Amino acid sequence: MKSAKTLFCSLGLVLALGLDAAAAPAIQDQPSGTPIEQGLWYLYHLQYDESRRLFNQYIDINPQDPAGYFYRTAADWWQLAQQFDRSLPEIQARLDSDYQETVRVAGRLIESSAQTDGKTRGLACLYSGGAQGLMGRWLVTQRQWMKAYFLGKSGHKMLKRALKYDPTLYDAYLGLGIYDYFTDTLGGVQKVLAAVLIRGDRKRGLRELQIAIDKSKNARVEAMTFLIEIYTWEEDTPEKALPLAQALHKEFPKSPAMHLAEILDHYELKNWNEVWNQSLDYLQKSETETPYYKKEGVLPAWYCLGVSSFFGKHDLDSAAGYMDKIVANSDDYSRWRTFAFLRLGQIADAKKNRDKALDYYKKVLNRPNFWGSHAEAERYTKEAFHT
Protein backbone atom coordinates (compact mmCIF):
# COMPACT_ATOMS: atom_id res chain seq x y z
CA MET A 1 0.00 0.00 0.00
CA LYS A 2 1.64 3.25 -1.10
CA SER A 3 0.34 5.06 1.92
CA ALA A 4 3.01 7.69 2.31
CA LYS A 5 1.81 9.27 -0.88
CA THR A 6 -1.26 10.44 1.11
CA LEU A 7 0.98 12.12 3.56
CA PHE A 8 3.58 13.75 1.34
CA CYS A 9 2.64 13.18 -2.29
CA SER A 10 4.32 10.97 -4.93
CA LEU A 11 7.04 13.31 -6.08
CA GLY A 12 7.95 13.82 -1.57
CA LEU A 13 16.99 7.95 10.58
CA VAL A 14 18.37 8.79 13.57
CA LEU A 15 21.06 6.16 12.90
CA ALA A 16 20.55 6.11 9.15
CA LEU A 17 20.72 9.91 9.04
CA GLY A 18 23.93 9.98 10.98
CA LEU A 19 22.28 11.90 13.83
CA ASP A 20 23.20 11.03 17.38
CA ALA A 21 21.05 11.50 20.45
CA ALA A 22 22.82 14.71 21.41
CA ALA A 23 22.14 16.25 18.02
CA ALA A 24 18.47 15.24 17.91
CA PRO A 25 16.08 18.22 17.60
CA ALA A 26 14.21 19.27 20.72
CA ILE A 27 10.61 18.18 21.22
CA GLN A 28 8.29 20.79 19.72
CA ASP A 29 4.97 20.37 21.49
CA GLN A 30 3.96 24.00 20.95
CA PRO A 31 4.71 26.66 18.33
CA SER A 32 7.51 29.14 18.90
CA GLY A 33 9.77 31.54 17.05
CA THR A 34 8.97 33.80 14.12
CA PRO A 35 5.58 33.81 12.34
CA ILE A 36 7.16 31.65 9.62
CA GLU A 37 8.44 29.11 12.16
CA GLN A 38 5.13 29.05 14.00
CA GLY A 39 3.26 28.70 10.72
CA LEU A 40 5.37 25.70 9.78
CA TRP A 41 4.67 24.11 13.18
CA TYR A 42 0.93 24.43 12.60
CA LEU A 43 1.35 23.12 9.06
CA TYR A 44 3.04 19.95 10.37
CA HIS A 45 -0.01 19.55 12.63
CA LEU A 46 -2.39 19.96 9.66
CA GLN A 47 -3.78 23.23 10.99
CA TYR A 48 -3.94 24.90 7.60
CA ASP A 49 -5.97 27.99 8.48
CA GLU A 50 -3.74 28.85 11.43
CA SER A 51 -0.58 28.35 9.38
CA ARG A 52 -1.95 30.62 6.64
CA ARG A 53 -2.91 33.25 9.23
CA LEU A 54 0.69 33.37 10.44
CA PHE A 55 2.13 33.43 6.92
CA ASN A 56 -0.27 36.28 6.08
CA GLN A 57 0.90 38.07 9.23
CA TYR A 58 4.45 37.85 7.92
CA ILE A 59 3.34 39.12 4.48
CA ASP A 60 1.58 42.11 6.05
CA ILE A 61 4.83 43.12 7.75
CA ASN A 62 7.11 42.15 4.83
CA PRO A 63 5.08 42.57 1.61
CA GLN A 64 8.16 42.73 -0.62
CA ASP A 65 9.64 39.50 0.76
CA PRO A 66 8.65 36.38 -1.25
CA ALA A 67 9.13 34.11 1.81
CA GLY A 68 5.61 34.59 3.18
CA TYR A 69 4.02 33.94 -0.21
CA PHE A 70 6.14 30.83 -0.67
CA TYR A 71 5.15 29.32 2.66
CA ARG A 72 1.52 30.13 1.95
CA THR A 73 1.96 28.14 -1.29
CA ALA A 74 3.45 25.32 0.78
CA ALA A 75 0.36 25.31 3.03
CA ASP A 76 -1.85 24.91 -0.06
CA TRP A 77 0.25 22.02 -1.32
CA TRP A 78 0.33 20.21 2.04
CA GLN A 79 -3.46 20.45 2.32
CA LEU A 80 -3.99 19.10 -1.19
CA ALA A 81 -1.50 16.29 -0.58
CA GLN A 82 -3.10 15.32 2.72
CA GLN A 83 -6.67 15.49 1.44
CA PHE A 84 -6.05 14.29 -2.08
CA ASP A 85 -9.13 12.06 -2.10
CA ARG A 86 -11.37 15.10 -1.72
CA SER A 87 -12.42 17.66 -4.31
CA LEU A 88 -10.89 20.94 -3.18
CA PRO A 89 -11.20 23.35 -6.12
CA GLU A 90 -10.85 26.40 -3.86
CA ILE A 91 -7.51 25.16 -2.49
CA GLN A 92 -6.31 24.23 -5.99
CA ALA A 93 -7.14 27.75 -7.19
CA ARG A 94 -5.36 29.17 -4.14
CA LEU A 95 -2.25 27.08 -4.88
CA ASP A 96 -2.11 28.43 -8.42
CA SER A 97 -2.61 32.01 -7.23
CA ASP A 98 -0.08 31.79 -4.38
CA TYR A 99 2.58 30.16 -6.54
CA GLN A 100 2.21 32.89 -9.17
CA GLU A 101 2.34 35.60 -6.51
CA THR A 102 5.53 34.09 -5.08
CA VAL A 103 7.18 34.07 -8.50
CA ARG A 104 6.02 37.63 -9.20
CA VAL A 105 7.28 39.07 -5.90
CA ALA A 106 10.53 37.11 -6.15
CA GLY A 107 11.09 38.28 -9.73
CA ARG A 108 10.60 41.89 -8.73
CA LEU A 109 13.10 41.47 -5.89
CA ILE A 110 15.66 39.90 -8.21
CA GLU A 111 15.36 42.82 -10.62
CA SER A 112 15.47 45.49 -7.91
CA SER A 113 18.43 43.88 -6.14
CA ALA A 114 20.63 43.52 -9.21
CA GLN A 115 23.20 45.83 -7.66
CA THR A 116 22.85 44.53 -4.09
CA ASP A 117 24.15 41.54 -2.19
CA GLY A 118 23.99 38.02 -3.55
CA LYS A 119 22.18 36.68 -0.49
CA THR A 120 19.07 38.74 -1.27
CA ARG A 121 19.02 37.57 -4.88
CA GLY A 122 19.73 34.04 -3.78
CA LEU A 123 16.74 33.99 -1.41
CA ALA A 124 14.48 35.37 -4.13
CA CYS A 125 15.62 32.62 -6.51
CA LEU A 126 15.14 30.02 -3.76
CA TYR A 127 11.50 30.98 -3.16
CA SER A 128 10.71 31.35 -6.85
CA GLY A 129 12.20 27.94 -7.65
CA GLY A 130 10.56 26.37 -4.62
CA ALA A 131 7.11 27.68 -5.55
CA GLN A 132 7.48 26.40 -9.11
CA GLY A 133 8.54 23.03 -7.71
CA LEU A 134 5.47 22.84 -5.46
CA MET A 135 3.17 23.65 -8.36
CA GLY A 136 4.99 21.16 -10.58
CA ARG A 137 4.62 18.40 -7.99
CA TRP A 138 0.89 19.06 -7.82
CA LEU A 139 0.60 18.95 -11.63
CA VAL A 140 2.34 15.56 -11.60
CA THR A 141 -0.43 14.21 -9.35
CA GLN A 142 -2.92 15.55 -11.91
CA ARG A 143 -1.02 13.79 -14.71
CA GLN A 144 -0.33 17.10 -16.47
CA TRP A 145 3.11 15.92 -17.46
CA MET A 146 4.23 18.62 -19.88
CA LYS A 147 3.23 21.53 -17.65
CA ALA A 148 4.81 19.80 -14.67
CA TYR A 149 8.13 19.21 -16.38
CA PHE A 150 8.44 22.71 -17.80
CA LEU A 151 7.79 24.09 -14.32
CA GLY A 152 10.24 21.56 -12.93
CA LYS A 153 12.92 22.64 -15.34
CA SER A 154 12.38 26.32 -14.59
CA GLY A 155 12.30 25.73 -10.84
CA HIS A 156 15.41 23.57 -11.01
CA LYS A 157 17.31 26.36 -12.78
CA MET A 158 16.18 28.87 -10.17
CA LEU A 159 17.41 26.67 -7.32
CA LYS A 160 20.78 26.23 -9.01
CA ARG A 161 20.93 30.00 -9.49
CA ALA A 162 20.14 30.53 -5.80
CA LEU A 163 23.17 28.46 -4.82
CA LYS A 164 25.39 30.41 -7.20
CA TYR A 165 24.37 33.63 -5.46
CA ASP A 166 24.70 32.09 -2.00
CA PRO A 167 26.23 28.60 -1.58
CA THR A 168 24.97 28.49 2.02
CA LEU A 169 21.28 28.39 1.01
CA TYR A 170 21.01 24.73 1.93
CA ASP A 171 17.19 24.81 1.74
CA ALA A 172 17.63 24.68 -2.05
CA TYR A 173 18.91 21.11 -1.80
CA LEU A 174 15.41 19.88 -0.90
CA GLY A 175 14.04 20.78 -4.33
CA LEU A 176 17.20 19.70 -6.13
CA GLY A 177 17.12 16.34 -4.36
CA ILE A 178 13.47 15.73 -5.24
CA TYR A 179 14.06 16.58 -8.90
CA ASP A 180 17.21 14.53 -9.21
CA TYR A 181 15.77 11.46 -7.52
CA PHE A 182 12.38 11.30 -9.19
CA THR A 183 13.41 12.31 -12.70
CA ASP A 184 15.91 9.45 -12.59
CA THR A 185 13.41 6.87 -11.30
CA LEU A 186 10.20 7.70 -13.16
CA GLY A 187 9.06 5.21 -15.78
CA GLY A 188 7.24 5.29 -19.10
CA VAL A 189 6.45 8.56 -20.86
CA GLN A 190 7.41 10.51 -17.74
CA LYS A 191 10.98 9.18 -17.95
CA VAL A 192 11.26 10.17 -21.61
CA LEU A 193 10.12 13.70 -20.82
CA ALA A 194 12.39 13.89 -17.80
CA ALA A 195 15.38 12.84 -19.88
CA VAL A 196 14.68 15.68 -22.31
CA LEU A 197 14.04 18.39 -19.73
CA ILE A 198 15.97 17.47 -16.58
CA ARG A 199 18.93 15.14 -16.22
CA GLY A 200 18.21 13.34 -12.98
CA ASP A 201 20.54 11.32 -10.82
CA ARG A 202 19.10 9.05 -8.12
CA LYS A 203 22.19 8.87 -5.93
CA ARG A 204 22.84 12.58 -6.19
CA GLY A 205 19.21 13.22 -5.24
CA LEU A 206 19.60 11.18 -2.06
CA ARG A 207 22.80 13.09 -1.21
CA GLU A 208 21.06 16.42 -1.78
CA LEU A 209 18.15 15.47 0.47
CA GLN A 210 20.67 14.53 3.14
CA ILE A 211 22.29 17.97 2.84
CA ALA A 212 18.86 19.56 3.31
CA ILE A 213 18.35 17.48 6.45
CA ASP A 214 21.75 18.23 7.90
CA LYS A 215 22.16 21.92 7.03
CA SER A 216 18.97 23.64 5.85
CA LYS A 217 17.12 26.29 7.86
CA ASN A 218 13.48 25.42 7.10
CA ALA A 219 13.57 22.41 4.73
CA ARG A 220 14.75 19.72 7.16
CA VAL A 221 11.34 18.28 8.09
CA GLU A 222 10.05 18.10 4.53
CA ALA A 223 13.32 16.50 3.37
CA MET A 224 12.89 13.88 6.08
CA THR A 225 9.31 13.18 4.97
CA PHE A 226 10.46 12.66 1.41
CA LEU A 227 13.06 10.18 2.58
CA ILE A 228 10.32 8.32 4.43
CA GLU A 229 8.49 7.97 1.12
CA ILE A 230 11.59 7.12 -0.87
CA TYR A 231 13.00 4.52 1.51
CA THR A 232 9.63 2.92 2.18
CA TRP A 233 8.07 2.73 -1.27
CA GLU A 234 10.58 3.67 -3.92
CA GLU A 235 13.64 1.88 -2.52
CA ASP A 236 11.60 -0.81 -0.70
CA THR A 237 13.69 -0.37 2.45
CA PRO A 238 11.16 0.62 5.13
CA GLU A 239 13.66 -0.37 7.80
CA LYS A 240 15.62 2.76 6.83
CA ALA A 241 12.51 4.92 6.93
CA LEU A 242 11.28 3.82 10.36
CA PRO A 243 13.94 5.65 12.45
CA LEU A 244 13.16 8.80 10.47
CA ALA A 245 9.42 8.49 11.09
CA GLN A 246 10.07 7.79 14.78
CA ALA A 247 12.31 10.86 15.03
CA LEU A 248 9.63 13.11 13.54
CA HIS A 249 6.92 11.64 15.77
CA LYS A 250 9.13 12.24 18.81
CA GLU A 251 9.91 15.79 17.72
CA PHE A 252 6.25 16.60 16.99
CA PRO A 253 4.33 14.44 19.49
CA LYS A 254 1.02 16.24 18.88
CA SER A 255 1.10 15.86 15.09
CA PRO A 256 -1.34 13.23 13.73
CA ALA A 257 0.58 13.26 10.43
CA MET A 258 3.88 12.29 12.06
CA HIS A 259 2.13 9.70 14.24
CA LEU A 260 0.44 8.06 11.25
CA ALA A 261 3.71 8.07 9.32
CA GLU A 262 5.31 5.94 12.03
CA ILE A 263 2.31 3.58 12.16
CA LEU A 264 2.45 3.09 8.39
CA ASP A 265 6.13 2.22 8.47
CA HIS A 266 5.43 -0.41 11.13
CA TYR A 267 2.67 -1.61 8.79
CA GLU A 268 5.11 -2.03 5.92
CA LEU A 269 7.52 -3.89 8.21
CA LYS A 270 4.67 -6.14 9.43
CA ASN A 271 5.33 -5.16 13.03
CA TRP A 272 1.73 -6.06 13.82
CA ASN A 273 1.89 -5.67 17.61
CA GLU A 274 3.30 -2.18 17.23
CA VAL A 275 0.71 -1.34 14.58
CA TRP A 276 -2.02 -2.51 16.96
CA ASN A 277 -0.78 -0.61 20.01
CA GLN A 278 -0.08 2.65 18.20
CA SER A 279 -3.34 2.49 16.26
CA LEU A 280 -5.28 2.13 19.51
CA ASP A 281 -3.53 5.27 20.75
CA TYR A 282 -4.28 7.07 17.48
CA LEU A 283 -7.93 5.97 17.69
CA GLN A 284 -8.35 7.21 21.25
CA LYS A 285 -6.83 10.59 20.41
CA SER A 286 -9.02 10.90 17.31
CA GLU A 287 -12.21 9.95 19.15
CA THR A 288 -11.55 12.52 21.88
CA GLU A 289 -10.11 15.07 19.42
CA THR A 290 -6.98 15.42 21.49
CA PRO A 291 -5.12 18.40 20.02
CA TYR A 292 -4.43 18.22 17.07
CA TYR A 293 -6.24 15.01 16.11
CA LYS A 294 -9.62 15.07 14.36
CA LYS A 295 -12.65 12.78 14.36
CA GLU A 296 -11.94 11.55 10.83
CA GLY A 297 -8.74 10.04 12.19
CA VAL A 298 -10.81 7.08 13.36
CA LEU A 299 -10.83 5.83 9.75
CA PRO A 300 -7.08 5.14 9.36
CA ALA A 301 -7.02 3.91 12.97
CA TRP A 302 -9.79 1.38 12.31
CA TYR A 303 -8.09 0.35 9.09
CA CYS A 304 -4.74 -0.31 10.75
CA LEU A 305 -6.42 -2.15 13.63
CA GLY A 306 -8.33 -4.27 11.15
CA VAL A 307 -5.25 -5.11 9.12
CA SER A 308 -3.25 -6.02 12.23
CA SER A 309 -6.17 -8.22 13.33
CA PHE A 310 -6.21 -9.88 9.91
CA PHE A 311 -2.53 -10.42 9.22
CA GLY A 312 -1.14 -10.32 12.75
CA LYS A 313 -3.75 -12.03 14.92
CA HIS A 314 -5.49 -13.97 12.10
CA ASP A 315 -8.82 -12.92 13.61
CA LEU A 316 -11.05 -12.68 10.55
CA ASP A 317 -14.20 -11.61 12.38
CA SER A 318 -12.45 -8.80 14.26
CA ALA A 319 -10.80 -7.61 11.04
CA ALA A 320 -14.12 -7.62 9.19
CA GLY A 321 -15.71 -5.68 12.05
CA TYR A 322 -13.23 -2.83 11.71
CA MET A 323 -13.64 -2.72 7.93
CA ASP A 324 -17.43 -2.69 8.27
CA LYS A 325 -17.09 0.29 10.63
CA ILE A 326 -15.17 2.17 7.94
CA VAL A 327 -17.81 1.42 5.30
CA ALA A 328 -20.61 2.49 7.64
CA ASN A 329 -18.96 5.71 8.80
CA SER A 330 -17.01 7.04 5.81
CA ASP A 331 -18.01 9.32 2.97
CA ASP A 332 -18.11 7.82 -0.49
CA TYR A 333 -14.98 9.73 -1.58
CA SER A 334 -12.86 8.29 1.22
CA ARG A 335 -9.77 6.33 0.27
CA TRP A 336 -10.19 4.30 3.48
CA ARG A 337 -13.56 3.09 2.20
CA THR A 338 -11.81 1.76 -0.90
CA PHE A 339 -9.26 -0.15 1.16
CA ALA A 340 -11.96 -1.46 3.49
CA PHE A 341 -13.74 -3.04 0.50
CA LEU A 342 -10.45 -4.53 -0.67
CA ARG A 343 -9.68 -6.10 2.71
CA LEU A 344 -13.28 -7.32 3.08
CA GLY A 345 -12.79 -9.11 -0.22
CA GLN A 346 -9.64 -10.76 1.08
CA ILE A 347 -11.38 -11.71 4.32
CA ALA A 348 -14.23 -13.29 2.32
CA ASP A 349 -11.68 -15.22 0.27
CA ALA A 350 -10.01 -16.40 3.48
CA LYS A 351 -13.44 -17.64 4.60
CA LYS A 352 -13.87 -19.46 1.26
CA ASN A 353 -16.78 -17.21 0.24
CA ARG A 354 -15.67 -16.51 -3.31
CA ASP A 355 -18.87 -14.88 -4.57
CA LYS A 356 -18.85 -12.36 -1.72
CA ALA A 357 -15.16 -11.69 -2.28
CA LEU A 358 -15.72 -10.95 -5.97
CA ASP A 359 -18.51 -8.55 -5.09
CA TYR A 360 -16.13 -6.57 -2.86
CA TYR A 361 -13.39 -6.51 -5.51
CA LYS A 362 -15.90 -5.14 -8.02
CA LYS A 363 -16.77 -2.37 -5.58
CA VAL A 364 -13.08 -1.43 -5.48
CA LEU A 365 -12.87 -1.37 -9.28
CA ASN A 366 -15.90 0.91 -9.45
CA ARG A 367 -14.17 3.46 -7.23
CA PRO A 368 -11.19 5.79 -7.86
CA ASN A 369 -7.85 4.01 -8.12
CA PHE A 370 -6.12 4.89 -4.85
CA TRP A 371 -2.50 3.69 -4.39
CA GLY A 372 -2.81 0.79 -6.83
CA SER A 373 -6.10 -0.50 -5.39
CA HIS A 374 -7.35 -1.45 -8.87
CA ALA A 375 -4.31 -3.59 -9.64
CA GLU A 376 -4.72 -5.44 -6.35
CA ALA A 377 -8.45 -5.94 -6.86
CA GLU A 378 -7.93 -7.14 -10.45
CA ARG A 379 -5.33 -9.62 -9.23
CA TYR A 380 -7.76 -11.20 -6.78
CA THR A 381 -10.64 -11.29 -9.23
CA LYS A 382 -8.47 -13.62 -11.29
CA GLU A 383 -7.07 -15.65 -8.43
CA ALA A 384 -8.49 -15.91 -4.91
CA PHE A 385 -6.53 -14.31 -2.09
CA HIS A 386 -4.70 -16.71 0.21
CA THR A 387 -3.20 -15.76 3.58
Image: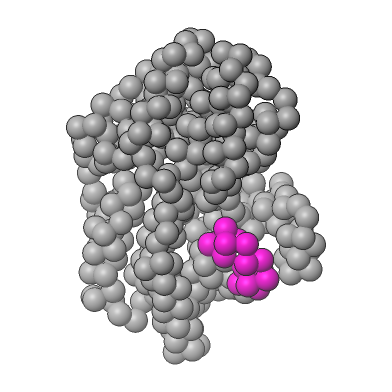
Q: Splitting the image into 4 quarters, where does residue 275 fall? A: top left
Secondary structure predominantly adopted by residues drawn in magenta: helix
Camera-nearest residue between 165 and 348: 348
Residue 2 on image: x %, y %: 57, 39
Residue 297 on image: x %, y %: 33, 37
Q: Splitting the image into 4 quarters, where does residue 256 fall? A: top left
Q: In the shown orientation, is residue 194 left or right of residue 313?
A: right
User: What segment is highlighted magenta in the picture?
Assistant: 137-152
Camera-nearest residue between 61 and 373: 373
Q: In the shown orientation, is residue 332 left or right of residue 223?
A: left
Residue 140 in view of the camera: yes
Position of residue 107 relative to residue 191, above or below, is below
Q: Residue placed farthest to the front in the image?
A: 355
Residue 142 on image: x %, y %: 57, 62
How is the protein colored in the picture?
one colour
Residue 21 in view of the camera: no
Q: In the shown orientation, is residue 134 left or right of residue 230?
A: left
Q: Please identify the quadrant where the C terminus is shown.
A: top right
